[in-house]
Each structure stands twice: as C-alpha cells, then as structure tokens.
Image: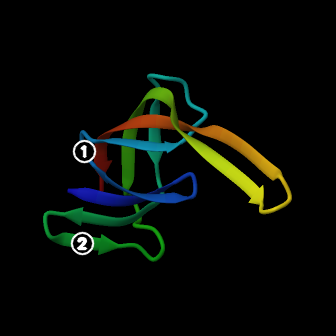
Amino acid sequence: MYAIVEIAGQQFKVEKDKYIYTHRLDQEEGAGVEFDSVLLLDDEGTVDVGGPLVSGAKVKGKVLEHVKGDKVLVFKKKRRKGYKKIQGHRQQFTKVLIEDILK
C-alpha cells in the first residue's frame, strides 16, 4: 500500500514504515504529524485517484529529527573581467517516519 501526498508544496510517494526527507517542518522532534493532502491511494491494485484530493484519506507520521542536506555551491564568473564569486548553503530537512496510511 502506498500513497502520493503533498507535503510543503512537494509531492512524495510514501509507504508504511519508510522514511522521507521533507523541507523543514515546524514540529518538534518526536512529535506526530498528519498529512491530509492525499492525491492518490493504492491498496494492492485498487487505485483511488482524488480530484484533487482523496476524501477521508490521511497519512500519519512521526518527526524523527531535523537534519541538513549536502552543501550546494553556487559559482559565478565573468570571463576576462577577473570576477569570481562562490557562495554555498546547506538546506534544512526534516526526517519523517511514515507510521500509517488511513483510508
């Protein structure tokens, strides 16, 4: 059984007892979260497609930790002008354990 869920503006394919990394959520570590924006639900071959959402479907999860992603480097250069600039950042993510998919 799996579901397609919209979390923080992105769509994720989630399954029970799997981990996902989303953009940082406001919940504390160890807190439970519920996602109501279920776009598609597959129950062993029976597919429910929402228009746009599947009514009554929810995904329950648990926030495990807040982590940082890999470093992303942004490099700018103008040739023959001697201009070089390098910047970098690390994106904030939340690791979520999917506990249950409810119909």
**Does the residue at mark 2 contact the one at mark 1 (Cβ under 8 Å)?**
no
Q: Quadrant of the C terminus?
A: bottom left
Q: Position of residue 99 (x, y in %)?
A: 30, 38
Q: Position of residue 5 (x, y in %)?
A: 42, 58
For residue 16, the mark is 1
Q: Image height check: is 73 above or below 79?
A: above
> Which residue: 24% across, 65% down?
42
Residue 20, quarter of picture: top left
Q: Compute the Cα span from label 2 to label 1.
A: 17 Å
Is label 2 in a helix, a strand or a loop?
strand
**In screen coordinates, is 62 left or right of 41?**
right
Q: Amino acid at mark 1?
A: Lys
Is label 1 in a helix, a strand or a loop?
loop
Q: Image height check: is 23 above or below 28?
A: below
Q: Image height check: is 79 above or below 66?
A: below
**In screen coordinates, is 16 left or right of 80?**
left
Viewer-side residue, 72 vs 42: 72
Q: Position of residue 51 (x, y in %)?
A: 45, 77
Which callout, 2 or 1, points at the residue further toward the start of the chain?
A: 1
Q: Amino acid at mark 2?
A: Val
The residue under label 2 is 47
Residue 57, quarter of picture: bottom left
Viewer-side residue, 10 vs 78: 78
**In screen coordinates, is 3 left or right of 24?**
left
Q: Position of residue 32 (x, y in %)?
A: 44, 31
The scheme the figure's colours follow is rainbow
Crowding near pointer 2: few (<14 within 10 Å), some, many (20+)? few
> Which residue: 49% across, 35% down?
94
> Which residue: 62% across, 45% down?
73
Viewer-side residue, 15 vs 23: 23
Residue 30, quarter of picture: top left
